[in-house]
Amino acid sequence: MKKAGFNDLEYIEVHKDQKESIDLLIRFYHELFVPSFPNENERESLENILYYIENSSNDFNDLLSRTLIFTDVENRVVAGIIFDYFEEIRAYAIEFIVVDKNFQGKGIASKVNELAVSMITEQYKKELEWLVIEIENPKKVTNGDFSYLYFWKKQHMKLVDFEYIQPALSGNKEPVTTLLLCVKNLRNNSVRTIHKKLIERFVDLYAKHAIGIARPDLDPTVSAMCRQLRAIEGDDIALLEIQGENEA
């Protein structure tokens, strides 16, 4: 069942036993998701997304994964988000957040993010300290669209100072080396470091629950990142400002 959202939009949580929500997810995938992720190595397949939903729990225990689809009064698919909550590290990870280009610049992405945070902290009464996202490395962007940089800088996201590589999303895809890992301390915007063990744990949890790698410790990409983190001197990693295209 759709719920009232914001800006005259409604949203629906995608559940395996709700055909309306699955139908909207499929529309979202083809209408917005595929055009937003032209690199197939960065784009999760519809089959995998449906598989994760089919096998997800409706309970909110140590892990929550939710998919929200937003529509307008004409039932046009306007935006969508998939996010994960990891109770162990009090972190909320955005797997993706997509807004139709015709509706961008209206504050929709910010409100989608706020709604997800509200679900975690108010609806489910969970502690939340960190927001984690992957963004395109502006040095490696080829389409000339840097609008995402301005958005995430405005959200006070900070770059984790290590070489992040997204593990392969499936056996027929390659690891992605064009992404950066960014975080935000939701309790204190001025925080400029993060404990490297938290990042190492995030890498492991994200690989297992968001990408579906049963044994992250055996995945070469995950193992390489963990070795890199352990080699960093001290307990903390610096959080850097996200640079714009002219600064990259």
Image (cartoon, rainbow, N blue to C red):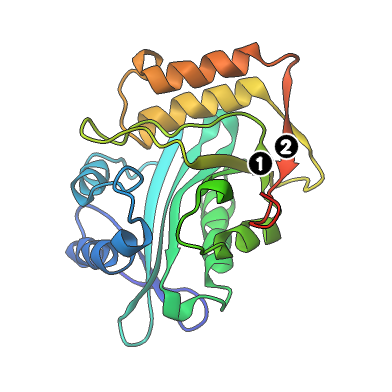
Q: Front-most of 58 and 86?
A: 86
Residue under the image location 23 percent in, 39 percent down: 55
Residue that badge 2 annotates: 239
Image quadrant containing the N terminus: bottom left
- Left/right of residue 21 with respect to residue 103 in the rendered view: left
Residue under the image location 38 percent in, 82 percent down: 72
Q: Give the amino acid type for the residue marked by disc 1 in the picture.
A: Leu
Q: Give the amino acid type for the residue marked by disc 2 in the picture.
A: Leu
Quarter occupied by residue 42? top left
Label 2 sits on a secondary structure element that is strand
Rendered location of residue 28, percent (x, y): 29, 66
Residue that badge 1 annotates: 159
Residue 13 seen anywhere in this rendered image of the structure: no
Quarter occupied by residue 147? bottom right
Q: Is residue 109 above or below residue 195?
A: below
| Name of the residue lying farthest toward the right | 190
Ranked by sequence position, the earlier of labels 1 and 2 is 1
Q: Is residue 226 above or below residue 145?
A: above
Label 1 sits on a secondary structure element that is strand
Residue under the image location 48 percent in, 73 percent down: 5
